[in-house]
Every structure is written in structure tokens, then in C-alpha cells.
């Protein structure tokens, strides 16, 4: 997966995802930091959400993580 592809796939009707291009843990190259942006409020979340595998990068997982659904 290229980062641009991930970013495009991670958009939903309300949340946009910004992927930081460096691992959050240098010992784990598959761990990336994800920041959610609320498109309706035009605000970034105050927290970073870390997903440890590329497989975790999908809209359903992120929306559930963010909304608690």
C-alpha cells in the first residue's frame, strides 16, 4: 500500500484520516500514527490513534475506534 492510497481509502462521510509518514515506534516498522479530522467541525482530534498493522487501516475499524460503535 502506498500512503496516498491509504489516505484516499480512509475517508468517510465525516472523518478524514491523516497518516503521519513515520513509524510511531522505530522497533515496529508496521506501527503508524493516525490522526482523525472531523470534517463537520474542521478540527483534528486531540489524540493520535495508533493502528499496528496495515490491515487495521480501514474506514470501519477507524470509525468504530473513534466513535466507540
Image (cartoon, helix red, strand yellow):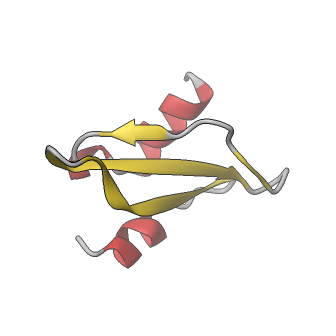
Viewport quadrant of the N terminus: bottom left
Residue 29 percent across, percent down from the top left: 17, 52
From what the image shows, is residue 22 above or below residue 24?
Answer: below
* Residue under the point 82% across and 53% down: 40
Q: Is residue 62 left or right of residue 66?
A: left
* Residue under the point 23% across and 52% down: 54
Q: Is residue 58 left or right of residue 34?
A: left
Residue 31 percent across, percent down from the top left: 26, 46
- The image quarter in which residue 12 lies: bottom right
* Residue under the point 53% across and 39% down: 63
From what the image shows, is residue 14 above or below residue 52?
Answer: below
Residue 34 percent across, percent down from the top left: 46, 49
Q: Is residue 30 left or right of residue 47?
A: left
Q: Residue furthest front?
A: 26
Asked if residue 10 shows in the view, the reply is no
* Residue under the point 34% across and 72% down: 3
Asked if residue 43 shows in the view, the reply is yes
Q: Nearer the viewer, residue 28 or 50?
A: 28
Viewport quadrant of the C terminus: top right
Q: Is residue 61 left or right of residue 11?
A: left
Q: Residue furthest right?
A: 41
Q: Nearer the viewer, residue 4 or 23?
A: 23
Number of callouts: 0
Q: Residue furthest top?
A: 68
Amino acid at each position: 500500500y502506498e500512503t496516498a492510497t491509504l489516505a484516499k481509502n480512509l475517508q468517510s462521510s465525516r472523518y478524514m484520516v491523516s497518516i503521519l509518514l513515520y513509524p510511531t515506534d522505530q522497533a515496529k516498522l508496521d506501527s503508524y500514527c493516525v490522526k482523525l479530522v472531523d470534517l463537520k467541525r474542521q478540527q483534528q482530534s486531540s489524540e493520535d490513534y495508533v493502528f499496528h498493522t496495515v490491515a487495521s487501516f480501514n474506514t470501519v475499524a477507524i470509525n468504530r475506534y473513534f466513535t466507540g460503535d
